[in-house]
Each structure stands twice: as C-alpha cells, then as structure tokens.
C-alpha cells in the first residue's frame, strides 16, 4: 500500500466542504477515465475571490483528500490565483503523493480552474 502523508490521511478520514452547493457561481466536473476518479467542484465568488468551495468526489482516498484539501487551500484566493493553481502546488502542499496518485492533484487543480472558467462564462 502506498504511503500517504498525515495530511492526506486527515483529509480522507475527515473530509471538509463535501456536498452540493445550491446555485453555484461556477462549477466543473472532471474525470480520469483510466482509474474512474470523478470530481465535481462548485464555487461561490464574492468580490472576485473564492468565498466557498464545495465538492463531490467518487474515487480513491487521495482523490477525496485532494478535493477536501484544495477546497480549503483556495478559500479567499482571487480568481486569478486559482487560474494559476498547479497540480504540483496541491501535491506539495498536501505533503506529496505517490507517483501513481499524482493524477488526483491534477483532477483537483483542473476542476477548480474549470469552475473559474465556468464562472467567467456566466459573468462576461
């Protein structure tokens, strides 16, 4: 079994911000067809900043953990900061991921950036 950081285990065992968000300002769903992980991220934006993030993830423990962690990580960030968020930043901040689980941080970053793009498409 892969070794996970204490932060990965904490967010897997006690996920934060999971669940639906009524009428989100932006949302995106991403999936990895190889492993079957699927993430849906919903954001609420106030004054150009992330006011709230909710997520629904079906997948392995690191997928759930990165969803939870990223939802807390970007709280208060500007939309521009979220658009520049990389998978490497998420993986490093959560204490690293095994090579075969880095795709989880890719999904989390892609979903957040996608939700910001959706927000911009609704608010040109």
Image (tube, grey):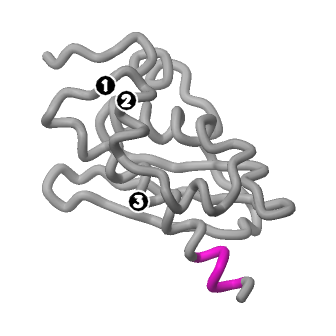
| Residue 120 shown in magenta | yes
Classify residue 96 as left or right of residue 15. left
Residue at figure coordinates x 69%, y 48% from the top left: 77
- Near-viewer residue (34 or 96): 96
User: In the figure, is residue 92 to the left or right of 25?
Assistant: left
Q: Measure the alpha-carbon separation of dots 2 and 1.
A: 5 Å
**Disc 1 secondary structure class:** loop
**Left or right, residue 30 beside residue 79:** left
Question: On the image, numbered disc 1 is attached to which residue?
Answer: 96
Query: In the image, what residue occupies the spot 29% across and 50% down?
Result: 37
Q: State the image coordinates of residue 24 (x, y, percent, origin top left).
A: 72, 66
91 lies above or below 50: above
Residue designated by label 2 = 92
Mark 3 or mark 2, which is nearer to you? 2
**Is disc 2 in contact with disc 1, using a CB cutoff of under 8 Å?**
yes
Seen at 40% across and 16% down, the residue is: 9
Q: For residue 80, which numbered disc appears in the image?
A: none
For the record, the magenta segment spans: 118-122
Q: Which residue is mark 3?
A: 110
């Amino acid at each position: 079994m892969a070794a996970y950081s204490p932060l990965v285990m904490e967010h897997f065992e006690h996920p934060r911000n999971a669940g639906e968000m009524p009428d989100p300002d932006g949302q995106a769903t991403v999936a990895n067809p190889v492993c079957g992980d699927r993430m849906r991220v919903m954001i609420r934006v106030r004054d150009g900043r992330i006011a709230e993030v909710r997520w629904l993830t079906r997948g392995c423990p690191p997928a759930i953990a990165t969803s939870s962690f990223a939802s807390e990580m970007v709280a208060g960030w500007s939309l521009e900061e979220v658009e520049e968020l990389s998978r490497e930043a998420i993986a490093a901040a959560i204490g690293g991921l095994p090579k075969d689980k880095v795709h989880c941080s890719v999904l989390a970053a892609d979903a957040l950036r996608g939700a910001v793009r959706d927000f911009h498409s609704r608010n040109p």
